Image (tube, rainbow, N blue to C red):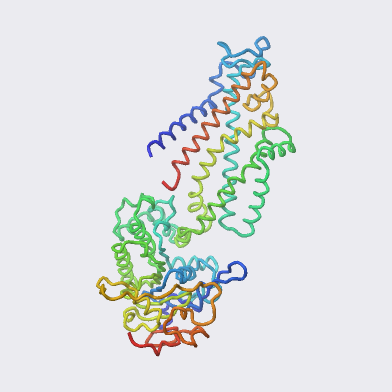
Amino acid sequence: MAEETRRLLELSHICKEFELKQGERLKAVADVTLSVEKGEWVFVAGESGCGKSTLVRLAARTEPLTSGKVLFEGKDLTSAREKELRWYRRQAQVVFQDPGDVCSPRMKVGRFLMEPWINFEKKTRREAKEMALYALERVGLSKEFFEKYPHQLSGGEMQRVAVARAIALHPALLICDEATSALDVSVQRQIIHLLREHQRETGVGILFICHDLALAENFGDRVAVMYLGHIVEVMAGNDLRKHARHPYTRALLDSVLSVRSDRQKPIPVLPGEPPSPVNLREGCVFRSRCRYAEEVCARKMPGPREVGDGHWAACWRAQGLPER
Amino acid sequence: MRRKWMRFFLFLFLAILVLSVAVWGNRLAPWDPLETDFEAKLMPPGREHWMGTDNVGRDVFSRILCGARNSFALTFLIIALVSVLGTWIGMVSGYFGGPLDTVLMRVTDILLAFPDTVFAIAVVGMLGPGLKNTVTALSFVWWTKYARMARGLAGVIRTRDYIVQARFGGAGTLKILVCYVLPNIVPQVIIMAALDVGGMMLALAGLSFLGLASQPPAPEWGYMLYEGKSYMQTAPWIMIFAGLAIFVTVVVFNLLGDSLRDILDPKE
């Protein structure tokens, strides 16, 4: 049971469908099973529109699921009431993509940082203020920011404030939705650095959604690759480049541009666009763009199969593909 | 940027001027606004009566000064009432959505389908003339405007990230409404209210003009128009000055509302 207790967040076969007009159904998240363990940094990578953000909202329990289960520290939150959700929100924190929308435009940054202390911990205003000032200091922002409004801060500063608040109460889990995507590269580094430092200190589990495979490769204990609502491959981050099995993961890796790329070589491009997620046909979701697609791929969507140690791929041909 | 503020302070100054007339009007008035003097009835504007006298010899200038208080008190009372009420109803409706929202919005649709003043006249007509009924009637037709706006804004705000963040900051629903949604609606409400002062004053004057709002002999601008109507040809000054008072006030508050919008505009 030791393994059980390490498990923090568990998403089990979660689905989210949106009903569009006239019986059209959009499957944003389809049968996703994923877990985050204590102290683990899990990345979910994929193109925009693949359902990453919906996955975040489901994991954060801000949106109802169509089916499946969300467990946190073994407790089922699927049909949790407000009281349990409140407990969950005390343990889990979110950081979103858009730093301009983190804080109400009419609320000062200081007040924003004080909120959790006042609401969750029932601190007095003075204590909360102390905590807020400490939080600012911790992310390298001066005291002056306490009295500022969000629009007076740059995106990077605001995102640091967002992270400062998210980690202030030492949550067990951090859910980040493209938390660095809207930022300059140098600021991205700061944020990632902050998160990693905090993880080292407290052992927080991080579920990090992004589309940057290079980031996932460098920092992810595990990386899940998502395509059209499905998780097509899960594997250890540092194995990514060498051992990726799924054709989609490989295509994504090929499109990561390196600083040292050879200008003479052609840049491999994944052909086509992802098909519309409305009323998907039978078969593997990736087959329309997959160069290894066979007849079997048109019949049924492959389930995740273990292809290595802690390495799962949802591909009929995963075993037969050539090594990279 | 500076011009915007200059404009705002100019109109604010004018508005305060008009308001101070309303507050200290009875002290400034050279005559008793209720005192009749049949010797001096229908006197044209002159040295003694700056704006002339009406059909029973009351000083028009004094009546306008004193009438300001009545007109303003009623206007502000109704606007305060409908903006607070309408904003809350609209905000709750927009934030929660669902069947409650549908019902409320159909009700506002029905109320908005009638022209404000006509509907108010109908309501006052049913309840009977008098100040209390006028306030009731105008509030009844006016709140929908605020409710619609607040509902629209709340509907957008509730989908924003910062509301989710607020939940993760431990805020309950009431706190979210009061501390996160409301502050982002209030500036728009203030602008709307400032722009509404003129309209409300006109509506009140309209009702008074029809003899439905304030009752004689209390001075009130709209009612003065009504009284002066019969002497429009022989003693036009009664109507002209009362009308001018309404006109100036409406213009000042409309421009104030406009410049307020320029300042509070979140796009800045």
Image position of A124 (left or right of B159): left
Quadrant in the picture for the C terminus of chain A: bottom left
Seen as rendered, the residue at the extreme top is: B39
Image position of B17 (left or right of A20): left
Quadrant in the picture for the N terminus of chain A: bottom left
Q: Nearer the viewer, residue A213 or B22?
A: A213
Q: Nearer the viewer, residue A175 or B116?
A: B116
Examine the image and state in which quarter residue B137 appears. Answer: top right
Q: Reply above or below: A271 against B240.
A: below
Q: Reply above or below: A311 against B159.
A: below
Examine the image and state in which quarter residue A213 appears. Answer: bottom left
Tell me how many marks there are: 0
| Residue name at image x 41 percent, y 73 percent | A46
Q: Nearer the viewer, residue B139 or A279?
A: A279
Q: Reply above or below: A131 against A316.
A: above
Image position of A259 (left or right of A203): left
Q: Position of residue A36 (x, y in %)?
A: 41, 76
Q: Reply above or below: B89 against A34.
A: above
Q: Position of residue A199 (x, y in %)?
A: 33, 71
Q: Position of residue A291 (x, y in %)?
A: 42, 82
Q: Position of residue A84 (x, y in %)?
A: 51, 68
